Amino acid sequence: MNFMDKMERKFGKYAIPNLMYYIIILYIVGYILRVSAGLTGIDLYSSFLSLNFKMIFRGQVWRLVTFIIQPPNTRLLFIFFALYFYYMIGTSLERLWGSFRFNVYFFSGVIFNIIAALIIYLVWGANFELNTYFINLALFMAYAVEFPDMEVLLFFIIPIKIKWLGILDALFLAFEIIGGYAALIAYNTGNTILFMRLLFNYGLHWFLATSALVAMINFFIFMMLTLKKPGKTRTQKNFRKFNKGMDKDSFGDRFSNARNEKTTWENTGYRPINPKGARHKCALCGRSELDGDLTFRFCSKCNGEYEYCQDHLYTHVHVK
């Protein structure tokens, strides 16, 4: 059981189901405020709700939360498609990961975005108001990893797989990070020409680079925590070790030796998992049919109804 599994068991009851539904509502509210600012000349979002650390340090702490209502697009022609697209991404990831893990990924992205704005304010003394732009890009990156073969219509005409858009997204973020900090180096070394080219020709700045960097850090940390393979028991380690040195043994002999290792269920550190929320669930690693194309079987030698995935059916310690 990895770290995320332990966190889910302990704090999973606090997760907000259908989180993306509420986020889309907040985006709609943010869009209405943006439109009203253009009509009335009063920008309520920038004045009272944006991520402005100068005002936060003066007591307007609600800005740490309210800044997330900034919509992913403010153009009338694209706002509906953008909201629908991000709703589809969010709900698909929540169905795949579960409410708790999706909550963790989204809100950790929000927290990292706040940290980036704080770093910019404290290190460079700039009151740079970060919005949800890089949070949404990190959300799309996760979707591209989990659903690489999903097709969308680029420009509403060209069918293209999500994985290629995810690669372009990753290249864009890398360009933003490298170019932004290159502009910082050029600025500090007095290379005004290079700095002006990076800033005015490509829009590269270390403020945006910092926000993009923390978004990618959040993405990689979450993926490492969730995609980490389950730990191996002593029986599994002995089986793999034995398997490498005994290539001439038959398939049945190898599993027989693995099953006969002197290891007990108690000292493995694993416990059966009650399969809630899934029809099948491995009693050893906790994976279910929601985690991919897995095969599950009950073990006839275990004392009780214990179901195992294809990776642990022959290598687990029998429950006596």
Image (cartoon, helix red, strand yellow):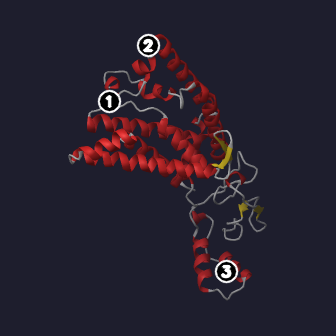
Residue 123 lies in what quarter of the image?
Answer: top left
Query: Which quadrant is home to the N terminus?
Result: bottom right
For image coordinates 65% across by 49% down, the residue present is: 160
Q: Is residue 146 left or right of residue 69?
A: right
Quote the CA–CA distance across marks 1 and 2.
20 Å
Residue furthest out toward the top: 40
Q: Which residue is mark 3?
A: 257
Q: Earlier in the sequence, mark 1 or mark 2?
A: 2
Q: Amino acid at mark 1?
A: Asn
* Residue nearest the viewer, comparing 168 with 44: 168
Q: Which residue is mark 1?
A: 127
Q: Residues within 10 Å of mark 2 (few under 14, many from 20)?
A: few
* Residue nearest the viewer, comparing 86 with 269: 86
Disc 3 or disc 1, which is closer to the eye?
A: 1
Q: Secondary structure at mark 2?
A: loop
For image coordinates 61% across by 31% down, the residue present is: 83
